């Protein structure tokens, strides 16, 4: 395996099986999100975890603002990972924005994927005529504000002027060491791209067998949205988990494991 | 026991902060009176199947799923999370949330315990600070751009002024060398006047360039021995010292933090002034120091002409002179350059004098 690719995406490969299963994290955190679910597949599958560029322990310097201005940039990364690990007919499990990243990758390179498992997917978070995404553009603006106050904190966002040191090496180190923290500029950019993109039209290009795993209620990717994804991907099944929220892999890991396992067994 | 329980209940319900217990899926299991009051809501309604995200502003609602829940699940806790509560009437309350995962015996499952602080006041100040910050940054950028422009302008100007002057003085020396000028007589006298004025103007232009190049913020600061600085300054002035038969006494001087080159320039200017603005007596210049609180003061004392104390501030002004060129040559920039350099070191400069009784120039610099 190319070690530069491994380091760039902080790829961790475990498991004893032959069939590769990639778990891709959503916006906000990193591969740790899968810590309650991924180990359950290690015995039977080849489990691959990675961090999107800009998240977790990925190589932040590889964050190219123009490449990642659309989700296509992330989809190309998934293809790069598959190709460099020599993966073929992979099961791709993606949460939230990564569900769509997986769909884009599968539409582009169908041979690389045998199955898509879309956990709480949304092709568009913003409302549109005849489409309920759940959010308005103002809402996304508010999210960016709350990212600002949480990532930087009011004190740190005024200190550079007072101290006159915009580098803040200590602060940067602290960021790297803590969970669910990203470079604030990347966090804002990724949020904007995640929550303002529209990939409804691409769903039709997905020919891979797909499972849509939907929580009820999910206030980030509502039931209507999950159903929309199911209706627009030809070879898809739709399962509603008996769990509320947007992170079933964290709050209901057993139900999530069971649903994924059942789907894989049906192959 | 009963009294204790009542006390605990009262503390929970009426505490000056909000308390919430959440089901990991987001349902509200417990809420205290304080929070109900802040939300202007009804407790029973909140406990009857309402979810936490329903009392959050939209931005916070997204943040809840993408950050807060993952943090609590993976870290066991989340600290100082900025969020916004939304009352039914649409009013927003900025809050600071601390959360922890815990096992709740009465619900017999893992729950999230949240404490909620109203930070409306703080948020106002924060926003004020942030606004002030971006304004300050904008101003600083404008100033920087202006400064760069000015530096370029004065650099170009001095250069452009110098080249015709060089041509003029070159032509005059050529005329002299080729003996085109009569040794005596009016033309020669006029030309020597032209020559000295051209030289004079060249010096003005160089001083102007130096003044504009003197950084207001020093990049390369390090430990500098002021004794060495003064000795260097005297070495540069060697010819003037010999010519004026001056006696220069340098006492024990401390090290300071600064730019050796720039500080040498300061003492070179001060000592040179002492030699030029002299009295009839042979110049005697004494340099000595004393400490004054957090500062060291270096005095440059002479027995020269001195000046009227009413000008003790004016002499540091840009291009200000107390003497005409016929008396003593000068550009009127030496002391303002000194002032600029000393201030860039975090210090100050002052002078005391009386006509005919010499002057003392005092450089005050931060003590190591």
Image (cartoon, rainbow, N blue to C red):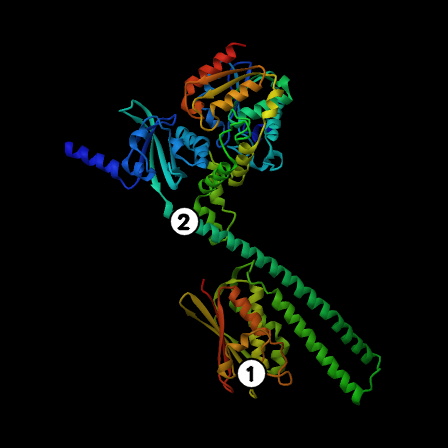
- Residue under the image location 62 percent in, 85 percent down: B327
Asked if residue B158 is positioned above or below residue A209 in the image, the reply reads: below
Marks 1/2: CA–CA distance: 64 Å
Residue A262 locus on image (x, y percent): 48, 12
Name the N-terminal-most of marks 1 and 2: 2
Asked if residue A80 is positioned above or below residue B145 in the image, the reply reads: above
Asked if residue A245 is positioned above or below residue B312 in the image, the reply reads: above
Query: Viewer-proximal residue, B273 or B115?
Result: B115
Residue A97 locus on image (x, y percent): 53, 28
**Residue B21 in which image quadrant:** top left
User: Quick check: A147 left or right of B274?
Assistant: left
| Count of numbered circles in the view | 2
Residue A41 locus on image (x, y percent): 48, 16
Which quadrant would the C terminus of chain A be assigned to in this image? top right
User: Quick check: B357 left or right of B146?
Assistant: left
Which quadrant would the N terminus of chain A be assigned to in this image? top right
Residue B11 locus on image (x, y percent): 23, 38
| Residue at the disc numbered 1 | B283
| Residue at the disc numbered 2 | B124
**Residue B35 in which image quadrant:** top left
Label 1: which secondary element: loop
Disc 1 crowd rating (10 Å Cα; few below 14, some 14-19, many 20+) is many
């Amino acid at each position: 395996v190319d070690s530069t690719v491994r380091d760039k995406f902080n790829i961790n490969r475990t498991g004893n099986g032959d069939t590769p299963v990639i778990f891709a994290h959503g916006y906000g955190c990193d591969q740790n999100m899968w810590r309650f679910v991924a180990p359950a597949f290690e015995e039977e599958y080849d489990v691959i975890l990675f961090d999107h560029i800009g998240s977790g322990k990925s190589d932040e310097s590889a964050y190219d603002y123009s490449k990642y201005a659309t989700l296509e940039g992330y989809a190309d990364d998934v293809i790069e990972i598959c190709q460099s690990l020599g993966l073929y007919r992979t099961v791709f499990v993606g949460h939230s924005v990564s569900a769509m990243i997986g769909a884009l990758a599968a539409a582009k390179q169908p041979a690389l994927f045998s199955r898509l498992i879309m956990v709480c997917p949304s092709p568009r978070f913003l409302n549109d005529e005849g489409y309920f995404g759940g959010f308005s553009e103002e809402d996304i603006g508010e999210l960016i504000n709350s990212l600002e106050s949480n990532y930087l904190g009011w004190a740190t966002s005024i200190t550079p002027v007072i101290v006159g040191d915009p580098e803040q090496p200590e602060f940067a180190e602290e960021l790297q060491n803590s969970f669910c923290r990203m470079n604030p500029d990347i966090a804002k950019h990724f949020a904007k791209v995640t929550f303002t993109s529209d990939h409804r039209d691409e769903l039709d290009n997905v020919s891979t067998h797909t499972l849509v795993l939907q929580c009820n209620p999910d206030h980030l990717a509502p039931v209507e949205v999950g159903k929309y994804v199911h209706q627009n991907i030809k070879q898809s099944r739709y399962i509603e988990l008996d769990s509320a929220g947007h992170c079933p892999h964290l709050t209901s890991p057993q139900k999530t494991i069971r649903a994924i396992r059942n789907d894989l067994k049906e192959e | 026991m009963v009294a204790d329980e009542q006390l605990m209940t009262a503390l929970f319900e009426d505490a000056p902060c909000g308390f919430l217990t959440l089901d990991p899926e987001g349902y509200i299991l417990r809420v205290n009176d304080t929070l109900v009051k802040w939300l202007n809501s009804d407790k029973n309604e909140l406990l009857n199947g309402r979810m936490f995200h329903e009392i959050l502003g939209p931005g916070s609602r997204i943040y809840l799923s993408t950050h807060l829940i993952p943090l609590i699940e993976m870290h066991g806790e989340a600290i100082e999370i900025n969020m916004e509560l939304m009352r039914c009437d649409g009013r927003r309350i900025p809050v600071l949330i601390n959360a922890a995962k815990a096992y709740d015996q009465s619900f017999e499952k893992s729950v999230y315990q949240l404490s909620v602080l109203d930070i409306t006041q703080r948020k106002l100040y924060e926003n004020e600070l942030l606004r002030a910050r971006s304004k300050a940054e904008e101003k600083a950028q404008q100033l920087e751009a202006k400064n760069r422009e000015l530096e370029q302008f004065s650099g170009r100007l001095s250069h452009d002024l110098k080249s015709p002057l060089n041509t003029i003085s070159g032509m005059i020396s050529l005329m002299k060398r080729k003996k085109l000028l009569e040794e005596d007589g009016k033309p020669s006298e006029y030309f020597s006047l032209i020559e000295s004025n051209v030289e004079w103007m060249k010096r003005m232009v160089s001083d102007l360039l130096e003044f504009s190049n003197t950084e207001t913020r020093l990049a390369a600061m390090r430990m500098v021995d002021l004794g060495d600085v003064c000795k260097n300054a005297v070495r540069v002035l060697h010819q003037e010292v010999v010519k004026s038969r001056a006696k220069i006494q340098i006492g024990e001087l401390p090290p300071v933090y600064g730019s050796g080159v720039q500080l040498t320039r300061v003492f070179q200017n001060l000592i040179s002034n002492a030699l030029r603005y002299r009295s009839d007596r042979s110049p005697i210049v004494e340099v000595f120091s004393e400490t004054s609180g957090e500062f060291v003061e270096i005095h440059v004392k002479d027995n020269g002409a001195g000046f009227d104390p009413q000008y003790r501030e004016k002499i540091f002004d840009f291009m200000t002179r107390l003497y005409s060129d016929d008396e003593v040559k000068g550009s009127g920039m030496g002391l303002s350059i000194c002032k600029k350099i000393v201030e860039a070191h975090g210090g100050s400069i002052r002078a005391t004098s009386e006509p005919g009784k010499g002057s003392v120039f005092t450089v005050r610099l931060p003590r190591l």
